[in-house]
Image: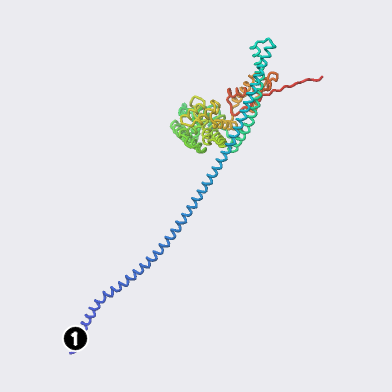
Amino acid sequence: MKDFVWIILIVVALIVGLIVGFFLLKLLPAMKAKDAQHKAEKILRDAEIRAEQIRKNAQIDGKQTIMEMKQEAEKDIRERKQEYANLENKLNQREQNIDRRDANLLTKENAIEQKNDQLNRRLQECDKKEKALQEKIDSIIVELEKVGQLSVNEARDQIFERVESKMAREIASYMKTKEDEAKSEAEAKAKELLSIAISKYAQEEVQERTVSVVPLPSDEMKGRIIGREGRNIRTMEQLLGVDLIIDDTPEVITVSCFNPIRRYVATKSLDLLIKDGRIQPGRIEEIVAKVQQDVDADIQKTGEEAAFKLGLPKINKELCTYIGRLKYRTSYGQNALDHSIETAYLAGIMAAELGLDQNLAKRAGLLHDIGKAVDFEQDGSHVELGSRLAKKFGEPDVVINSIESHHGDVPQNCLIAYLVQAADTLSAARPGARSETLENYIKRIEQLETICKGFDGVYQCYAMQSGREVRVMVIPDKVDDLAAYKMARDIREKIENEMTYPGQIKVSVIREYRAVETAK
């Protein structure tokens, strides 16, 4: 019985366990679903919180970006306002300058009109004097016909001789007076203009020597340069186009050539060969080709730098090459390129003072001696060659006339040509700018004195101040004051026509009469 009870209890327990297990199996997924729902709700809440934070941060960043953009826009507006203000100031200054120039032009026009009025009045006075003189001549002729036994033609000839003699003296005196007045006014204005130009531009006094001498470390190097049976020196002279003079002068080789560029290439090539030590035909060809290439590049660069330094636009590239070649050309020891640049500066400054085109004046000054870049290779004077080059590259007529007239070969047809001539003279004549050999100096002094002695009435003349002044002593019984004045003009014209000289020559004709007695 007890076993049966235990069996029943066991069966009941199994049934109860099955029932409990069944319910647990049913309740477990529901509990898991509920837990998952809680987790999902928590994730959604966290996502909403993060989204809210991101939105707030985005709003803050947007406001900051808008603020920065606003500040940048305000800064840009301020800068533009400042630029507009600066431009307005510049325009105001330019208008003021234009007003001043207009006022100066009006003043000059008024002065010219006044001078024209004065000339007209003087012409009227001359006409009146001429009529009065004619009346006097007629009356004299009538008197001569009445009193004398001369014919009308003979009387006329005598009167004309007397009138001509008297009028010649009066005309000479009048010309001297007016020329003195014009000279005083022109000299004052010219001194003012030149002083302004000189004060605004100052260049060091530098002279160059044209003798090309290559120093050697020892006399043994001469034999290596000559080479076996002279093959090295023959190769150098053939490639370089120069003469190498190897004489008894110790440790020196002289390079002789009329072409300064070839002479420079030869000197540079010899220096490099001497430093390298390998002197043979193959090495010589290599060094010469390299130096020639470097010199060509330097010539082009120098010409472009000169144009850029002067602020000159649109200069032909090939013409810049000719400008660069002036670096190796000298005149009386003065470098031709430095002289051209200095002339350009001075001409530009004077043109600016006169209200002319400053850039055009600089261009004419820079190119006035461009013919010297080729005068050692082509026939003709540097003026003719320079004119051809300017016409070839389409330079303005003002530049061409400045080139042709800066030595007085043709007349100037524009003001800039006069300024270029003045700037050229100023650059060449200033102290220390040029030098010349003793032989040329003596010849120039002798020619100057010979010209002066060729005039009638001269008994002595002296060239002074290195040929920049000549003093002529005349015989007072043969030459009066007016004739002395005329002689000075004639000597000046003859010097200008027959001599070539740097700068200016002052001519002074001196007439002195002394009465000497001895008391005994």
Q: Quadrant of residue 148?
A: top right
Which of the image's four quarters has the N terminus? Answer: bottom left
Q: Is residue 333 visible?
A: no
- In the displayed orientation, state which residue is furthest to the right: 520
Disc 1 residue type (three-letter) = Ile
- In the displayed orientation, state which residue is furthest to the bottom: 1
As rendered, which of 375 and 264 lies closer to the eye? 375
Instruction: Specify few, some or many for label 1: CA neighbours under 10 Å numbering under 14, 14-19, or 20 or more.
Output: few
As rendered, which of 426 and 247 lies closer to the eye? 426
Tell me: 55 left or right of 201.
Answer: left
Q: Position of residue 422 (x, y in %)?
A: 57, 31
Q: Is residue 480 visible?
A: yes
* Residue 62 versus residue 296 in the image, above or below: below
Disc 1 target residue:
8
> Looking at the image, what colour scheme do you see?
rainbow
Q: Position of residue 279 (x, y in %)?
A: 47, 32
As rendered, which of 464 and 354 lies closer to the eye? 354
Q: Does dot 1 land on a helix, a strand or a loop? A: helix
Tell me: 335 left or right of 174.
Answer: left
Which of the image's four quarters has the C terminus? Answer: top right
- In the displayed orientation, state which residue is furthest to the top: 149
* Residue 263 versus residue 144 in the image, above or below: below
Q: Position of residue 484 (x, y in %)?
A: 66, 22
Q: Quadrant of residue 45?
A: bottom left
